[in-house]
């Protein structure tokens, strides 16, 4: 602003010449200056008022617009936003085929310390060591009294432990929220579920990762927020699983076995209804793996999937079924069974001398090694290999477990005549009990390939046809005869038409050769044999049971078969299978679930 002088010299001089009063000029100029200042002040005030009014109008307009938008929108849950990488701690539940919880999440707390905020670090260390006996008291005291600013103490706490820590009264002991994985059924289905562990951790959250089993196989799916918390539905039935583990555990004790395996599978879908491996463990407190020695000595070892066993005479039905399919034999065809049989420098014997000839049916019923080898020779090594490949014995099972790929069968690299002979009666090729269950399910499914699965779903694509329905039906009839008049008579359960095959295989030594008195006994069954609904495989590691005539027996007919019968008797009513006759004898419940030890 340029100020005009209140008494300009030129005007003052002219005013004096004309006789005017110079003070009037000053007054006039002062009044003009004041009017100009007032005009500027008024314009400035008007501008500010307009800005304030405009701001109020805009603010209330936005509020009104937002309220209108919210009034016409669907209600949603608010979401907290956080910057930086987030730890995904939420994990979906795992349920059985009926929706019963197998694995879920539990809100708990972790405990950590800020040593600089502790009033009495030494006392805090002593009292924490009393609450948590597994902690190293000396190391904890050193951590709390040293120069560290942060110390983890426990990754998860029980409510009782949390209260005990509260009672210490130290401000430097801090609780952080946690979500831990909980297996409410304890040991039940432990090998299937596998277990979990913490991954990335922070003071306010921790990542839960699968360690084994389906927890690891479906880790990404279980942690995916896109699934909106939907549970993973497994094919197993919790009640059937509990019954199998109980009966199998009793059978393992009665038969003095080192370990046991049981698999129950639906024929039509391949869904595993129950699968147990003993000994087992509690996934809530998963033990550490063995670093040396035999892996099967660890309770973490899943015998059903990871076990690689020579499954003995349970294999004999495969070359016979294939030969029937090829039109080479039928059930009444007579086969040379003279024993011993020589192949190269090797001799093949039968357990008993069955004479010069046996029918194909009797070869299976009496479990003749020589007769089975004669039939396998009719097929030839190439056709034998192809059929076993079609049944899945040359690849790992596709079951949805992290252990699945580790259970690939041990197949001979070369396949000379002696290998073809020994594989025909279940020696020289080592596979898992789950492979055997899948192959028997294929026989029961009219020759259409069945692949095992642990996921419960509506649609199951049909497998390829690897055997004709006619040959599959003939094989099932032979399996039924094994139970009614052969080596598996102890597997009979009135009203359920069990058909199956026993197999007793010498157990190989880790350094080569076989143990003289250790076997793996197996019984593979389909039932009801006329309209198969289920496949059941029972395998016992190193069983031994007292025989009625003295001594002891290790054969599958005396060990695995009666355990399988107890399982069929216990599980069938749970599965909705009714016996095929009206009147059943009254069977009193027994502590050993009906297991009775008798000789063949």
Image (cartoon, rainbow, N blue to C red):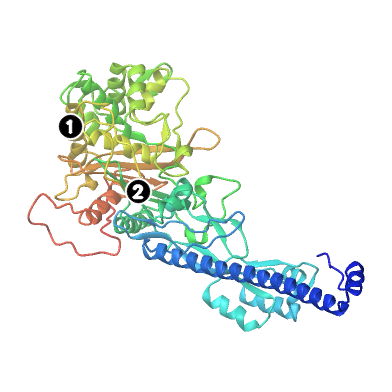
Residue hosting label 2: 262
Q: Give the class, few, some or many, for how many residues have Cα within 10 Å of label 1's Cα (few <14, many ≥20).
A: many
**How far apart are the two marked residues, 1 and 2, measured between alpha carbons?**
25 Å
Residue at 27% over, 26% down: 466
Q: Nearer the viewer, residue 145 or 246?
A: 145
Q: Are marks 1 and 2 in contact (CB under 8 Å)?
A: no
* Image quarter of residue 364: top left
Position of residue 322 in the picture relative to residue 296 (left or right): left
Which quadrant would the N terminus be assigned to in this image? bottom right
Label located before the other in sequence (1 or 2): 2
Position of residue 366 in the picture relative to residue 117 (left or right): left
Tag 1 secondary structure: helix
Position of residue 220 in the picture relative to residue 331 (left or right): right
* Image quarter of residue 489: top left
Position of residue 502 in the picture relative to residue 8 (left or right): left
Q: Residue furthest left?
A: 582
Residue at 34% over, 37% down: 436
Residue at 53% over, 78% down: 160
Q: Residue furthest front?
A: 18
Residue at 19% over, 41% down: 532
Residue 368 in view: no
Tag 2 secondary structure: strand
Q: Give the class, few, some or many, for how many residues have Cα within 10 Å of label 2's Cα (few <14, many ≥20).
A: many
Residue hosting label 1: 473
Residue 590 position in % (x across, y down):
26, 64
Residue 173 position in % (x across, y down):
67, 75
Which quadrant would the C terminus be assigned to in this image? top left
Q: Nearer the viewer, residue 537 or 523?
A: 537
Q: Nearer the viewer, residue 520 or 246?
A: 246
């Amino acid at each position: 602003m340029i100020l005009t002088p209140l008494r300009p010299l030129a005007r003052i001089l002219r005013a004096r010449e004309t006789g005017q009063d110079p003070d009037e000029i000053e007054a006039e100029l002062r009044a003009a200056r004041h009017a100009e200042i007032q005009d500027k002040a008024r314009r400035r005030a008007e501008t500010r008022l307009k800005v304030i009014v405009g701001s109020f109008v805009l603010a209330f307009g936005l509020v009104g617009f937002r309220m209108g938008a919210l009034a016409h929108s669907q209600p949603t849950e608010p979401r907290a936003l956080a910057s930086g990488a987030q730890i995904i701690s939420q994990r979906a539940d795992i349920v059985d085929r009926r929706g019963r919880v197998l694995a879920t999440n539990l809100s708990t707390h972790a405990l950590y310390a800020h040593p600089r905020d502790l009033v009495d670090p030494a006392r805090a260390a002593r009292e924490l060591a009393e609450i948590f006996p597994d902690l190293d008291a000396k190391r904890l005291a050193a951590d709390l009294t040293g120069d560290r600013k942060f110390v983890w103490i426990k990754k998860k706490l029980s409510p009782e432990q949390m209260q005990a820590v509260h009672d210490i009264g130290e401000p430097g002991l801090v609780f952080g929220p946690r979500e831990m994985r909980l297996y409410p059924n304890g040991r039940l289905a432990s090998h299937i579920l596998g277990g979990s562990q913490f991954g990335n951790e922070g003071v306010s959250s921790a990542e839960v990762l699968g360690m084994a089993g389906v927890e690891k196989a479906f880790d990404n799916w279980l942690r995916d927020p896109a699934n909106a918390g939907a549970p993973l539905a497994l094919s197993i039935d919790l009640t059937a699983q509990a019954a199998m583990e109980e009966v199998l555990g009793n059978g393992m004790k009665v038969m003095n076995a080192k370990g046991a395996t049981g698999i129950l599978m639906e024929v039509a879908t391949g869904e595993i209804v129950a699968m147990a491996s003993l000994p087992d463990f509690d996934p809530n407190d998963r033990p550490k793996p063995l670093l040396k020695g035999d892996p099967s000595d660890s309770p973490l070892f899943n015998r059903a999937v990871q076990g690689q066993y020579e499954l003995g005479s349970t294999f004999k039905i495969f070359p016979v079924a294939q030969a029937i399919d090829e039109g080479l034999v039928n059930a009444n065809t007579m086969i040379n069974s003279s024993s011993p049989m020589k192949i190269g420098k090797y001799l093949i014997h039968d357990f008993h001398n069955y004479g010069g000839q046996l029918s194909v049916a009797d070869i299976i019923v009496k479990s003749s090694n020589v007769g089975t080898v004669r039939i396998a020779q009719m097929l030839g090594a190439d056709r034998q290999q192809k059929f076993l490949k079609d049944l899945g014995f040359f690849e790992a099972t596709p079951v949805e477990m992290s252990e699945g790929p580790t259970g690939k069968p041990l197949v001979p690299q070369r396949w000379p005549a002696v290998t073809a002979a020994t594989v025909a009666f279940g020696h020289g090729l080592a596979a898992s009990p789950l492979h055997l269950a899948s192959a028997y399910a294929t026989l029961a499914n009219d020759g259409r390939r069945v692949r095992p699965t642990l996921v419960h779903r509506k649609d199951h694509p049909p497998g390829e046809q690897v055997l004709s329905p006619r040959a599959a039906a003939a094989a099932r009839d032979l399996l039924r005869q094994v139970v009614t008049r052969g080596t598996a008579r102890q597997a009979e359960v009135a009203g359920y038409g069990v058909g199956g095959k026993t197999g007793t295989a010498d157990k190989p030594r880790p350094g080569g050769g076989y143990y003289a008195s250790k076997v793996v006994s197996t019984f593979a069954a389909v039932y009801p044999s006329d309209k198969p609904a289920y496949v059941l495989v029972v395998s016992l590691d190193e069983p031994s049971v007292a025989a009625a005539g003295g001594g002891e027996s290790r054969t599958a007919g005396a060990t695995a078969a009666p355990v399988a019968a107890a399982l069929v008797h216990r599980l069938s009513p749970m599965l909705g299978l009714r016996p095929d006759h009206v009147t059943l004898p009254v069977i009193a419940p027994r502590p050993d679930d009906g297991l009775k030890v008798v000789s063949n």
